[in-house]
Image (cartoon, grey):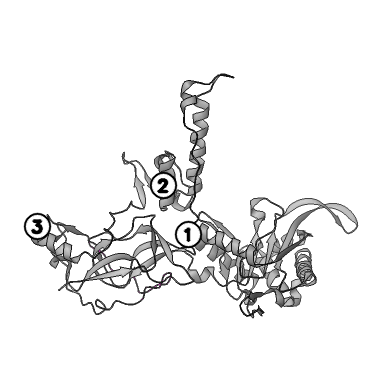
Amino acid sequence: MAVVREFTLPDLGEGLTEAVVVRWLVEVGDVVAVDQPVVEVETAKAMVEVPCPYGGVVTARFGEEGAEVPVGAPLVTVAVGAAPDALPGARSEPGTPAPAPEEAPAAESGSGNVLVGYGTSGAAARRRRILPAAPGPAAAETAAAARPAGPAPAASGPARSVADPGGTRTVAVISPLVRRLAREHGVDLREVRGTGRDGLILRTDVESAVRALAGRASRAAPAAPGLRTEAAAAAPAPAEERIPLKGLRGAAAEKFSRSRREIPDATCWVDADATELLAARAAMNVPGAPKVSLLALLARICTAALARYPELNATVDTAAQEIVRLPAVHLGFAAQTDRGLVVPVVRDAQDRTAEQLSAEMARLTDAARAGKLTPAELSHGTFTLNNYGVFGVDGSTPILNHPEAAMLGVGRIAPKPWVHEGGLVVRQVVQLSFTFDHRVCDGGTAGGFLRHVADCVERPALLLRSL
């Protein structure tokens, strides 16, 4: 006899209390295996797939794509303990052989492996769609009894891609926010070329299309100087745009605000000649060897400087009124993605070489841009490296990544006049800015840290002392 089990959004950890439904991986009537992912959700930390601990037939889904679901709210209901073809009111697709009976030892209790962001089993079992037959009185009564109380199940959401009605092109879209943005501004996604991986349409692609449409509209209707048509006079004024501070954007806003409220920060900065550092990197990247990124070299310099000034690898326990100095450097680095700014964390950075740091930072950056970082890879950093030079700017005053006590900012490296060996020459110059929590140290410590970083940038051989 089939038993209907309700699977709710599990505790996401890290203080997260809700998630946004990004994409459903199953539909009503699908057969799912124990621990098979059923929905992809976006939290304030990452985008992850949620596995269901029950095996059986999906009887209901809750939540449209793009809807926010609190922890503990139902996601799906699954009928377990019976073959799919035995369910009242269901029939198999024509030509589909009946499945062999399967034992389901976890059907009653579930696997229990529902922690978001972590794998729970091997490859998911194949799925077979169950098509509902024409509802009769018995089937309708059974379906009504199986349906749990609460909101009605959502209809099947939009697919991962939008098909061209002419059959000429498939439009790759993942984010429901991108689809909504296109719909609100009248953008035909079939005419948008995605710049993401495999032609994926990103939010920036839609925003560019919106600007292009506005430009074409303004050029198509020129008005004579000093004249205003009745149609233009009657046209409504553009409506203001409101963007919810939810998900990743909301979490970042709260963290920035808390940092400004609680941490008495100060910033110092210095210009450094990075010519020798660029030359050292070029010498490292010989053909056939793994590449070492400039960011990895700067990360290695940071770990060496923190070994000399360990009081900066710390946090403040406001409840106990204590400064807590931390034994390991978990180095966060700012990465810009289509979902916004995220800070992946390299664990135990002090034990890694420049080559190892480069490989790990590349892996975390790829995962961040794909939205696949786990909460553990976005949490518990102790120091942050922020390379805003990639945006073409020289300087900044970073906001500390609460509850960390320090952050190094790196501007662009650009050719500038510089006094070198008594003469005025053109050198590759970078501005370094250092923001620190004034509770954990005074200006002397902060200045010493920044000066040591600048010295290592100008003379990379100094790093040999710490190897």
Q: Quadrant of residue 112?
A: bottom left
Residue 289: % across, % down: 61, 66
> Which residue has dot 2 on it?
180
Type of secondary structure dominating the magenta stretch: loop
The residue that appears at 44% across and 67% down in the rendered structure is: 17
Asked if residue 223 is positioned above or below residue 380 in the image, the reply reads: above
Label 2 Cα neighbours within 10 Å, binned few <14 / some 14-19 / many ≥20: few
Q: Is residue 289 visible?
A: no
Tell me the quarter of the image containing the C terminus: bottom right
- Circle 1: residue type: Gly
> Image quadrant for the N terminus?
bottom left
Q: How many marks?
A: 3
Closer-to-camera residue (346/427): 346
Residue 127 sits inside the magenta stretch: yes
Which residue of the protein is positioned furthest toward the left in this rendering?
137
Across and down, in percent, residue 132 comes to: 16, 57
Q: Which residues are magenta?
A: 113-128
